[in-house]
């Protein structure tokens, strides 16, 4: 499979983008030349210079540093959200798929309920009511985005549980828990990885969208979506305030999409059909 | 075939778009187009079209707010106080509503009763307070002693409506414009009322469009889609911007009756040091982008008449601030923040009234200004006014950022609302945190009981002097102005300090 | 499973989902921080209200009743068409929603149309000229389009078409001219994703036997492509477009605000900003009702058209 992955140049590009951004996020405090929240209105809207490679924003803060720390914030939020989402999705999907029966019915009704309203709108309603802020953002996103994971996991678990090796394991006296952990989960992992990669791109867009509306990260937090929001009023006088974060967001999502596409195609395409990412 | 049809469809769409152009080449006289942020509706609960927050001049109140914050005759030509507490208003004759019916005392009574049912705020007008003496005379007796009623009635919420009209669907008033059309979330249109009692409008009508995004409003002006933009974003520099006279304030209130850890504000030395660290000139320039004056009053200086100069404010002097803190025993620690007896000099600034965005970037500026004198400032942002009020009740803050506008002519209102500790109708969470006591209360009482305007102004100025100079409970940051964008064809637009009292009938298009 | 049994099961499921989402919608009001009575009084008078007043209003509004009772009361009213009154305007929430939904619908449909009008020719040429420079560029542009936040484009288009060229109005409600820019902004994202998908399915079709047969018979490549392959390739695209609709509604929220388009998305944002909880609750329930109904109808028609389709297939994924 690795050779499949490496064969596609675009997948490699996506992988590189993601790794670079992750590195930037991890080492932000070493990489950023300035404090991203240091305000200096005298030097507002400065153009690129030796001191400020990308110039400054409306409050004189260094744009490059804000973008760098923005990686930490935006990607960090995506990571946290994905962990929450994946745990919930796995739990529900395995429970529904493995146990089946009434549990499956009930859980799938729950899934249908959440899917009955377009996710962006429901997310907006939840985050909006909880009030702006990062905690509400995480709660809101986690309570909605787990459903696609749950569905995929459920489908795969159902397929896997009928397989011979599961019967064999059971015949040998393995408990359900052991079967799930040692036999079923490893079978699901590749699909989960694909889904995660594609969904992360969507999450970046969702988080930046909510922050753009003022509901996510609050100023002066250097999150990319919040930076877009800050730059809104200055679109004609200083378009770079919106252009830079917009560009970075697009590149990040692009990276995730390329990686996800490549991963999905590397797995046998026939098996991968339930894993239609939303952006495709 | 699919390819061809879709391509031609696209071409048709673009062609349709290219034909005709936006308002640019219309022939005069045409209606004025104003871009405003939103519908707003009344002050919660009862929809009233065309009244608030953008005043479309469908309605008029009994008295109007002059440019220098005095009540002027509007639908009432004169008024007098009949002791002990009854105000008699004499109505202007020859005034008609848009439906042709005459303005009578009965219409005034009906309007006041409707308003009283919803809660009339600080006027004291309750159901039954208003009485029609005869067709052109109205008596209003508030439920508590209120010497400032005519100054309060200038606010558009007290506009006189035709008896039995439905303000939510079909507003009928006496103003120079009559209601024409309302489309929810889109626009409200008014047309010239030819039976107006005064000088009628120069234009045939006005369309107020609701454009929530500030960047879009700016672009609309540039593209000549609209003629006037209300609430032009103050950060955008544009040659066509005009600013109203001073109409509002941004201040920091300091908690003086706090419980640990919010008790540092009880020390006047600390309050003085904070005030000395504030650079109002810089705030006017960097926070308000020139849409504010560095004046140290809370209510607009015009409202205090000749007495505004009694308020000096604390001068910007970081060296003096440091000296004050030094002599109070606060030693600078290793990280630059002062300590005394093991306690860090750390303050919390609560930002959120009326919303957190209006203050940006003041909190960050305050943070660095206070850091320079050795105070650590923690910024607590609350999302809206309700959350802010909740926090006021629990008292969890040292400094409270507030911004507001002055929309009536009552100089005593703000000081009474926030800082008065005497007997009042409703207990105030503000007073618990901020009220200094009798030194202020006597001036608020004097203001509220003043018979002449001059007495009221003097007492209000003295009250502010106590708050700003003596006790330093209020630290004024900026005296704010409203920002409008004007297209190059607009003539005769004079921005009123209170945009709620903006008049449109003298506006024309070249 | 015979049709009537399937019908009962399907509709019963829909009703249960509707009830669950109504519970979620109602809970939003309770999740919210702050006290609605407090907010209303504050807005009404401008002064911070007294405790006694707040308590009285809470009692009047029925806010001091237990959750279950309030939910049932709200739900039974909602079934009867009464979604409560907006805190901001005092007008019935359902009326406000119905006044604005057509505008959003028009925008979403126009965006889908624009998306298709751009995507179809682009995908066809891309598939026909596979692996040429055009194809690579088109694929990259499509991928970029899917990765970019849609609202960014809004300001750029505004600046270009309205301010600089003066061809179209900047914002506001109106006919085709006012719809053009917001539909274009929203539709470009749609176009990008449809292009990607259509190119994929077209290429799949082009590898199929019937295509090779047709070409062997001497039909030109383009003819085969547009006459036969396209028709088949469009099928899943149509399905996906229907699915994309929900996503378009979500993105429409921002586009409506930026372009001052009088739809429900923008109204929702304003309700959130003003803490208008009845409006938010009503909005969620309204959208859910529309989608559940449409999905059930779609399922029904699928079933009617092709009884072999197994019930429970995930056609109802509005994301």
Image (cartoon, rainbow, N blue to C red):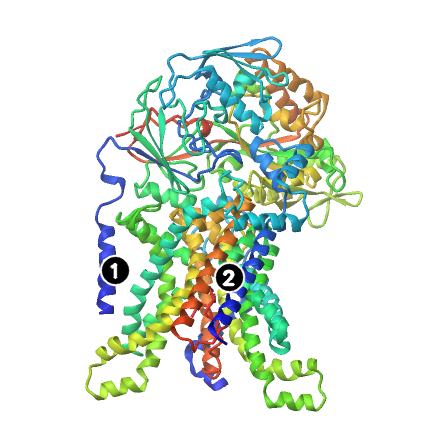
Q: Which residue is mark 1?
A: B10
- Residue A35 pos. (x, y %): 57, 54
Say which chain tag 1 marks: B
Residue A56 seen in the current view:
no
- Residue B225 pos. (x, y %): 31, 41
- Residue at figure coordinates x 62%, y 17% from the top left: B448
Badge 2 and badge 1 in a common chain = no
C-alpha separation, residue under disc 2 versus residue under disc 1: 33 Å
- Residue B399 pos. (x, y %): 65, 38
Residue A196 seen in the current view:
yes
Q: Quadrant of residue C21?
A: bottom right
Please indicate whether residue C217 sits to the left or right of residue B399 in the image.
Answer: left
Viewer-nearest of discs 2 and 1: 2
**Helix, strand or loop status at disc 2:** loop
Please indicate whether residue B49 sits to the left or right of residue A30 in the image.
Answer: left
Q: How many numbered dots are placed on residues in this image? A: 2
Please indicate whether residue C116 sits to the left or right of residue B382 in the image.
Answer: left
Say whether marks 2 and 1 touch (CB < 8 Å).
no
- Residue A84 pos. (x, y %): 61, 66
- Residue at figure coordinates x 62%, y 9% from the top left: B84
Figure check: B98 above or below A15? above
Q: Which residue is mark 2?
A: A116
Q: Quadrant of residue C51?
A: top right
**Helix, strand or loop status at disc 1:** helix
The 10 Å Cα crowd at callout 1, few under 14, some 14 to 19, many 20 or more, is some
Of residues B299 and A277, the one nearer the viewer is: A277
The 10 Å Cα crowd at callout 2, few under 14, some 14 to 19, many 20 or more, is many
- Residue at figure coordinates x 34%, y 20% from the top left: B196
Q: Residue furthest top?
A: B83
Figure check: B360 above or below B244? below
């Amino acid at each position: 499979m690795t050779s499949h992955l490496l064969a596609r140049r675009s997948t490699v590009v996506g992988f590189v983008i993601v790794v670079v951004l992750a590195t930037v996020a991890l080492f932000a405090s070493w990489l950023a030349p300035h404090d991203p929240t240091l305000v200096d209105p005298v030097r507002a809207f400065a153009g690129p210079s030796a001191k400020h490679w990308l110039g400054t924003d409306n409050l004189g803060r260094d744009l490059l540093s804000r973008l760098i720390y923005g990686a930490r914030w935006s990607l960090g939020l995506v990571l946290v959200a994905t962990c929450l989402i994946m745990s919930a999705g796995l739990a529900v999907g395995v429970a529904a798929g493995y146990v089946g029966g009434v549990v499956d019915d009930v859980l799938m009704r729950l899934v249908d309920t959440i899917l009955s309203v377009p996710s962006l709108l429901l997310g907006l309603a939840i985050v909006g009511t909880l009030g702006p802020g990062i905690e509400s953002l995480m709660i809101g996103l986690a309570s909605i985005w787990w459903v696609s994971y749950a569905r995929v996991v459920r489908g795969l678990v159902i397929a896997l549980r009928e397989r011979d090796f599961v019967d064999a394991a059971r015949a040998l006296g393995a408990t359900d828990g052991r079967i799930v952990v040692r036999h079923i989960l490893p079978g699901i992992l590749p699909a989960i990885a694909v889904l995660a990669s594609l969904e992360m791109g969507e999450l970046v867009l969702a988080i930046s969208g909510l922050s753009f509306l003022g509901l996510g990260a609050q100023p002066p937090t250097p999150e990319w979506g919040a930076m877009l929001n800050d730059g809104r009023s200055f679109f004609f006088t200083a378009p770079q305030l919106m252009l830079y974060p917009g560009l970075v967001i697009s590149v990040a999502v692009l990276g995730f999409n390329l990686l996800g596409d490549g991963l999905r195609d590397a797995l046998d395409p026939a098996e991968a059909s339930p894993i239609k990412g939303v952006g495709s | 075939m699919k390819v061809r049809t879709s391509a031609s469809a696209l071409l048709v769409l673009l062609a349709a778009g290219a034909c005709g152009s936006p308002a640019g080449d219309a022939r005069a006289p045409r209606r004025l187009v104003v871009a405003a942020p939103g519908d707003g509706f009344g002050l919660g609960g009862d929809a009233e079209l065309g009244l608030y927050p953008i005043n479309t001049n469908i309605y008029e109140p009994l008295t109007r707010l002059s440019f220098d914050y005095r009540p002027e005759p509007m639908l009432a030509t004169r008024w007098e106080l009949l002791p002990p507490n009854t105000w008699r208003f004499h109505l202007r004759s020859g005034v008609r509503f848009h439906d042709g019916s005459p303005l009578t005392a009965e219409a005034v009574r009906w309007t006041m009763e409707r308003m009283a049912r919803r809660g009339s705020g600080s006027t004291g007008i309750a159901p039954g307070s208003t009485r029609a003496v005869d067709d052109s005379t109205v008596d209003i007796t508030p439920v508590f002693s209120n010497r400032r009623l005519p100054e309060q009635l200038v606010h558009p919420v007290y506009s006189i409506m035709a008896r039995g009209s439905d303000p939510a669907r079909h507003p009928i008033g006496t103003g120079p414009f009559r209601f024409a059309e309302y489309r929810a979330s889109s626009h409200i249109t008014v047309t010239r009322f030819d039976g107006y009692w005064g000088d009628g409008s120069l234009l045939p009508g006005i369309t107020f469009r609701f454009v929530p995004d500030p960047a879009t409003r700016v672009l609309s002006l540039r593209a000549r889609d609209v003629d006037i933009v209300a609430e032009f974003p103050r950060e955008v520099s544009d040659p066509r911007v005009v600013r109203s006279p001073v109409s509002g304030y941004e201040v920091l209130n300091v908690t003086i009756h706090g419980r640990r850890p919010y008790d540092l504000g009880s020390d006047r030395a600390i309050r003085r040091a904070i005030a000395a660290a504030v650079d109002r000139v810089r705030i006017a320039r960097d926070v308000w982008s020139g849409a504010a004056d560095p004046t140290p009053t809370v209510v607009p200086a015009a409202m205090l008449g000749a007495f505004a100069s009694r308020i000096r404010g604390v001068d910007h002097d970081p060296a003096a601030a440091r000296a004050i803190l030094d002599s109070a025993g606060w030693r600078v620690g290793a990280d630059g923040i002062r300590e005394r007896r093991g306690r860090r000099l750390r303050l919390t600034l609560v930002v959120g009234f009326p919303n957190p965005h209006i203050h940006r970037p003041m909190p960050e500026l305050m943070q660095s200004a206070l850091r320079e004198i050795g105070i650590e400032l923690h910024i607590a942002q609350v999302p809206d006014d309700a959350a802010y009020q909740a926090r006021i009740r629990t008292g969890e803050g040292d400094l409270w950022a507030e911004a507001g506008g002055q929309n009536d002519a009552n100089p005593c209102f703000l000081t009474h609302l926030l800082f008065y500790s005497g007997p009042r109708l409703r207990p105030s969470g503000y007073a618990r945190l901020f009220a200094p006591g009798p030194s202020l209360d006597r001036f608020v009482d004097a203001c509220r009981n003043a018979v002449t305007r001059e007495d009221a102004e003097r007492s209000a100025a003295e009250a502010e002097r106590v708050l700003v100079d003596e006790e330093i409970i209020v630290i004024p940051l900026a005296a704010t102005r409203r920002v409008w964008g004007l297209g190059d064809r607009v003539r005769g637009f004079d921005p009123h300090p209170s945009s709620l009292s903006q008049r449109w009938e003298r506006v024309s298009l070249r | 499973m015979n049709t009537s049994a399937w019908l009962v099961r399907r509709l019963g499921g829909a009703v249960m989902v509707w009830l669950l989402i109504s519970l979620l919608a109602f809970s939003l009001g309770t999740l919210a921080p702050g006290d609605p009575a407090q907010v209303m009084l504050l807005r009404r008078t401008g002064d911070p209200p007294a405790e006694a007043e707040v308590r009285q209003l809470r009692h009047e509004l029925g806010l001091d009743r237990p959750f279950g009772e309030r939910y049932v009361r709200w739900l039974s009213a909602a079934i009867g068409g009464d979604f409560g009154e907006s805190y901001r305007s005092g007008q019935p929430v359902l009326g406000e929603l119905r006044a604005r939904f057509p505008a959003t619908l028009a925008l979403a449909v126009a965006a889908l149309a624009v998306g298709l009008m751009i995507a179809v020719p682009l995908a066809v040429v891309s598939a026909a000229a596979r692996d040429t420079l055009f194809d690579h560029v088109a694929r990259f542009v499509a991928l970029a389009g899917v990765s970019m936040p849609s609202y960014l484009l809004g300001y750029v288009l505004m600046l270009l078409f309205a301010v600089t060229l003066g061809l179209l109005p900047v914002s506001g409600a109106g006919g085709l001219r006012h719809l053009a820019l917001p539909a274009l902004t929203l539709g470009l994202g749609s176009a990008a994703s449809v292009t990607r998908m259509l190119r994929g399915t077209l290429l799949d079709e082009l590898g199929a036997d019937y295509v090779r047969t047709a070409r062997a018979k001497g039909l030109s490549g383009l003819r085969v492509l547009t006459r036969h392959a396209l028709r088949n390739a469009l099928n899943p695209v149509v399905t996906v477009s229907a699915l994309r609709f929900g996503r378009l509604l979500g993105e429409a929220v921002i586009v409506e605000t930026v372009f001052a388009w009088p739809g429900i998305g923008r109204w929702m944002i304003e309700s959130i900003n003003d803490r208008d909880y009845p409006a938010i609750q009503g909005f969620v329930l309204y959208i859910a009702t529309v989608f559940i109904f449409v999905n059930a109808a779609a399922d029904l028609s699928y079933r009617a058209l092709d009884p072999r389709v197994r019930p429970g297939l995930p056609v109802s994924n509005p994301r």
